[in-house]
């Protein structure tokens, strides 16, 4: 319905801290205009200078749909509200971007995706790390390290607000460790349909989550911790002919090839460290010069999703990827 629009009319539900990141990403997308925001708790005076002056503020979704007439809406609200809001938007024929976690259960996610298909509406999950440089390079180069043996996805974080429990904080960040892992497991095995099996897990009240996953002969190890330090996020991908590390702090993909036997094994730490140091130095300069952004992949994901709407191209991620997560 929106394939030939000159301007994509965009709505936003939820304009808290993450919502403001979406405002920035929408503003960077060519041919897109933020026309309306829903947030009953927001104060237009507090938002002045942070949102476009001509973006109207509404108290409910129904009024946004009626008066602003958006083509696509971003849902950036508490996780337990995602399914109901997404269904309301889909029913109105609006394309939907849902922040992570997309839904609290696989059954709910499946129902929303099926509902979108029935209404010929496109839907996207907030899996922006898939569109950051290390994840893109890892996906492109994963075949170069041979058969994928195992992948470790690690994310250490801190509790950002004392008004939520460690468990709720872990639920909020958990998808960022899961969706790159399942994406790389499928890319490394070439298996797009077989189920990814959870072989074991340990979930703690402290907000630490450990899980063991299996897809064919590939094993995935998931670690999310609010206790461990320093703050890091990476995947280490081990293959039969080398290993890669996708590091989201440095923004780099580091790769070490070959068997590493004999005296050459002493060089392996340097082969890991030198590219990482170079990338970290580059990233430091990027930040120091003021060119940084909190979520580098968010703008890319938003632009990709909008292009799938306006040009009829493929979605940024498959429904299977959302269900895997």
Image (cartoon, rainbow, N blue to C red):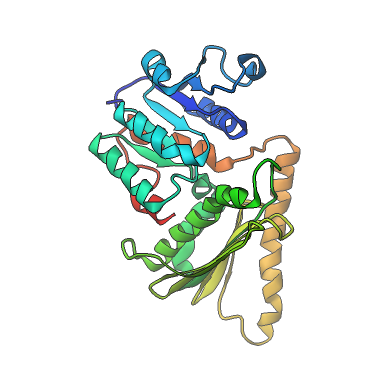
> Residue at (71%, 70%) from the top-left corner?
270
In the orientation shown, which residue stands out farthest toward the left? 118
User: How many numbered discs, if any?
Assistant: 0
In the orientation shown, which residue stands out farthest toward the bottom? 262
Please say whether residue 107 is visible from this viewpoint: yes
> Residue at (47%, 72%) from the top-left corner?
219
> Residue at (74%, 43%) from the top-left corner?
285
The quadrant of the image that shows the C terminus is bottom left
Residue 186, image x, y percentages: 40, 62
Residue 131, image x, y percentages: 50, 46
Q: Tell whether 251 sits left or right of 313.
A: right
Please say whether residue 318 is visible from this viewpoint: no
111, above or below 266, in the image:
above
Q: Nearer the viewer, residue 106 or 273?
A: 106
Residue 266, image x, y percentages: 71, 80
The image quarter containing residue 185 is: bottom left
235, above or below 215, in the image:
above
């Amino acid at each position: 319905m929106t394939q030939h629009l000159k301007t994509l009319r965009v709505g936003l539900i939820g304009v808290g801290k993450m919502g403001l990141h979406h405002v920035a990403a929408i503003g960077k997308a060519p041919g897109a205009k933020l026309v309306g925001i829903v947030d009953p708790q927001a104060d237009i005076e507090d938002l002045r200078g942070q949102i476009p002056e001509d973006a109207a503020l509404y108290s409910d979704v129904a009024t946004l749909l009626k008066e602003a007439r958006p083509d696509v809406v971003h849902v950036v609200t508490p996780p337990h509200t995602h399914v109901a809001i997404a269904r309301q938007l889909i029913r109105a024929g609006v394309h939907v971007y849902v922040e992570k976690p997309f839904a609290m259960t696989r059954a709910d996610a499946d129902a929303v995706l099926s509902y979108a298909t029935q209404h010929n509406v496109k839907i996207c999950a907030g899996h922006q790390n898939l569109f950051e440089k290390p994840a893109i390079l890892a996906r492109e180069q994963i075949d170069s390290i041979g058969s994928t043996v195992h992948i470790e996805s690690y994310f250490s974080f801190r509790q950002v607000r004392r008004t939520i429990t460690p468990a709720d904080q872990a639920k909020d960040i958990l998808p960022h460790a899961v969706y790159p892992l399942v994406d790389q497991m499928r890319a490394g095995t070439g298996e797009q349909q077989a189920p990814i099996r959870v072989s074991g897990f340990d979930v703690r009240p402290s907000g630490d989550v450990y899980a063991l996953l299996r897809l064919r002969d590939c094993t995935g190890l998931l670690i999310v911790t609010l206790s461990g330090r320093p703050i890091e996020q990476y995947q280490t991908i081990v293959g039969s002919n080398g290993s890669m590390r996708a590091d989201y702090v440095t923004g780099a993909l580091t790769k070490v090839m070959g068997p590493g036997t004999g005296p050459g094994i002493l060089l392996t730490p340097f082969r890991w460290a030198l590219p990482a140091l170079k990338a970290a130095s580059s990233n430091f300069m990027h930040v120091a010069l003021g060119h940084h952004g909190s979520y580098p992949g968010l703008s890319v994901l938003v632009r990709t999703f909008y292009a799938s709407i306006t040009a009829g191209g493929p979605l940024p991620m498959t429904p299977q990827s959302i269900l895997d997560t």
